[in-house]
Image: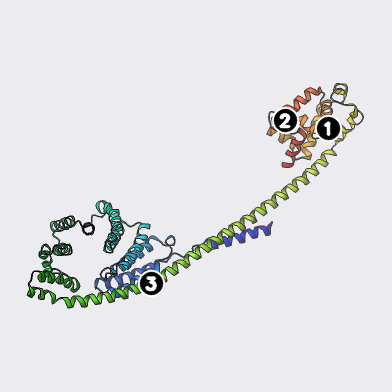
């Protein structure tokens, strides 16, 4: 038995090892180091060093990203912010597919936490990127999902403005130019009431009108580029549109003046495309390494689960074997105890005297002549001795029987003790000094009390074996 429990202990130890986490939770120091990387990348973003920022955000994800169930909330939040900033690198480079991929990964963690503020920012930017690639239905889905959050939770004017601007773009995509311009004017009014700059918004209306072929209506809005706070790329793009308008109006001098900015725009656009391709290449390499690592972790976890299942099965089989062995051993012990008790009972003085008393007349006793042998009835002292013999041989069985079944009368208990001698009903009726029918009625009553349909002798012997 000791060896069996040693086996159980061995399996239990293996099970504990198999059920361990596939990856340890990161230390506070690791999260702090990742935060330093994130801050460095964010500073690069603020300084427009977009390509320099990207490796810092990759480093954050490399330090913290594991299977979501093995990450803490702090780890998931910082990882999601890193992906959000990766998207901010791709956005000005117009690498929309990479931007969308990074935003989806950011939302995956933000939704798991959940973090409402970041969910709003990521969802709005994702919807904007989806609108750029003409996936209007998906863009509308994310916009509609966060609008209630903006109205009830955010309270951030920038979130509201971004959502309204995206709505205007969706109107534009559907060809509803009037609705598009109306929403953009609402944005301008909203910002004006709060003392916010609206020049860039006016230029946005002009761009939408231009590409909707309302060039004359677009012109006054586009001219605000002269005082707008635009970089060379955006300024050159708008100047190019104005140059086309002046050409259509047959004003070559004005057209030439605005076309002067075209080389700067082209050069900047060329640099944007080159930087964007480099950023996407780096991102694709990062993704491949990340996906390979996550897949390895999934396979490791699946392997551990299979090992745990096998160990559970092995442990269950060992436990079952131990239980079966214990039951068999207990039954053997009970059978041995029963056999020893039975031998002791058969050798008791009262048992021998009963057999001797019936030895001469037993063959003549039957159900029809029980009353002819009334002289063979046992005395109360004999029955007390018989009860004591049963108790001595079988561990107090007669006393326990009386306690377990209080409805048994003293005469019933005497009948039970006689039943263990193996005598016939007629012989037991003689020994109790009652008529045969009275005795059989008593046996029926006793069996009902004990809740059995088998013979009284068999029932009592089974109870003895069960202990």
Quadrant (top left/top right/bottom left/bottom right) for the C terminus? top right
Taking the spot 64% from the left edge, 54% from the top edge, the residue there is 319
Quadrant (top left/top right/bottom left/bottom right) for the N terminus? bottom right
- Compare marks 2 and 3 and give the one earlier in the sequence: 3
- Compare marks 3 and 1 and give the one earlier in the sequence: 3
Residue 65 as seen in the image, left or right of residue 425: left
Quarter-wise, where is residue 34 in the image?
bottom left
Name the residue beneath numbered marker 3. Answer: 286
Indicate the secondary structure of the residue bearing disc 3.
helix
Residue 63 as seen in the image, left or right of residue 271: right
User: Closer to the camera, 72 or 275?
Assistant: 275
Taking the spot 18% from the left edge, 74% from the top edge, the residue there is 232
User: Closer to the camera, 315 or 176?
Assistant: 176
Name the residue beneath numbered marker 1. Answer: 423
Residue 404 as seen in the image, left or right of residue 295: right
**Residue 108 placed where, x, y %?**
37, 60
User: Closer to the camera, 363 or 300?
Assistant: 300
Indicate the secondary structure of the residue bearing disc 2.
helix
**Residue 259 placed where, x, y %?**
13, 75
Q: Are marks 3 and 1 in contact (CB under 8 Å)?
A: no
Marking on residue 447: 2
Mark 1 surroundings: few (<14), some (14-19) or many (≥20) residues within 10 A: some
The residue at the far right in this view is 360
Nearer to us of marks 3 and 1 is 3
Q: Are marks 2 and 1 in contact (CB under 8 Å)?
A: no
């Amino acid at each position: 038995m000791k060896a069996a429990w040693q086996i159980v202990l061995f399996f239990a130890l293996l099970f504990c090892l198999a059920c361990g986490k596939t990856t340890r939770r990161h230390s506070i120091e690791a999260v702090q180091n990742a935060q330093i990387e994130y801050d460095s990348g964010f500073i690069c973003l603020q300084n427009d060093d977009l390509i320099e920022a990207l490796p810092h955000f990759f480093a954050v994800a490399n330090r913290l990203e594991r299977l979501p169930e093995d990450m803490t909330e702090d780890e998931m939040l910082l990882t999601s912010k890193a992906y959000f900033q990766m998207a901010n690198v791709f956005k000005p480079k117009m690498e929309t597919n990479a931007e969308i991929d990074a935003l989806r990964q950011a939302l995956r963690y933000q939704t798991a936490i959940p973090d409402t503020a970041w969910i709003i920012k990521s969802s709005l930017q994702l919807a904007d990127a989806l609108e750029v690639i003409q996936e209007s239905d998906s863009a509308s889905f994310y916009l509609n999902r966060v609008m209630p959050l903006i109205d009830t939770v955010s309270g951030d004017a920038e979130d509201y403005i971004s959502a309204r601007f995206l709505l205007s773009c969706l109107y534009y995509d559907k060809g509803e130019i009037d609705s598009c311009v109306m929403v953009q004017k609402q944005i301008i009014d909203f910002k004006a009431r709060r003392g916010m700059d609206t020049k860039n918004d006016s230029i946005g209306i002009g761009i939408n009108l231009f590409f909707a072929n309302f060039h004359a209506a677009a012109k006054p809005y586009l001219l605000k580029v002269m005082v707008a706070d635009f970089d060379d790329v955006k300024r050159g793009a708008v100047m190019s549109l104005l140059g086309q308008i002046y050409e259509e109006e047959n004003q070559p001098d004005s057209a030439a003046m605005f076309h002067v900015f075209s080389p700067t725009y082209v050069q900047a656009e060329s640099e944007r495309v080159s930087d964007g391709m480099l950023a996407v290449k780096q991102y694709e390499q990062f993704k491949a390494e990340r996906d390979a690592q996550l897949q390895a972790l999934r396979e490791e976890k699946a392997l551990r689960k299979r090992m745990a299942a096998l160990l559970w099965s092995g442990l269950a089989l060992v436990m079952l074997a131990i239980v079966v062995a214990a039951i068999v051993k207990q039954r053997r012990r009970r059978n041995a105890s029963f056999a020893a008790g039975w031998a002791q009972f058969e050798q008791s003085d009262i048992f021998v005297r009963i057999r001797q008393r019936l030895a001469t007349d037993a063959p003549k006793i039957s159900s029809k002549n029980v009353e002819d042998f009334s002289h063979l009835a046992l005395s109360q002292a004999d029955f007390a001795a018989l009860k004591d013999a049963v108790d001595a041989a079988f561990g107090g069985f007669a006393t326990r029987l009386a306690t377990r079944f209080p409805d048994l009368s003293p005469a019933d208990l005497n009948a039970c003790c006689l039943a263990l001698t193996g005598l016939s009903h007629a012989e037991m009726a003689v020994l109790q000094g009652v008529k045969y029918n009275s005795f059989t009625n008593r046996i029926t009553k006793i069996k009902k009390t004990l809740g059995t349909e088998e013979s009284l002798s068999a029932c009592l012997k089974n109870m003895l074996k069960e202990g």
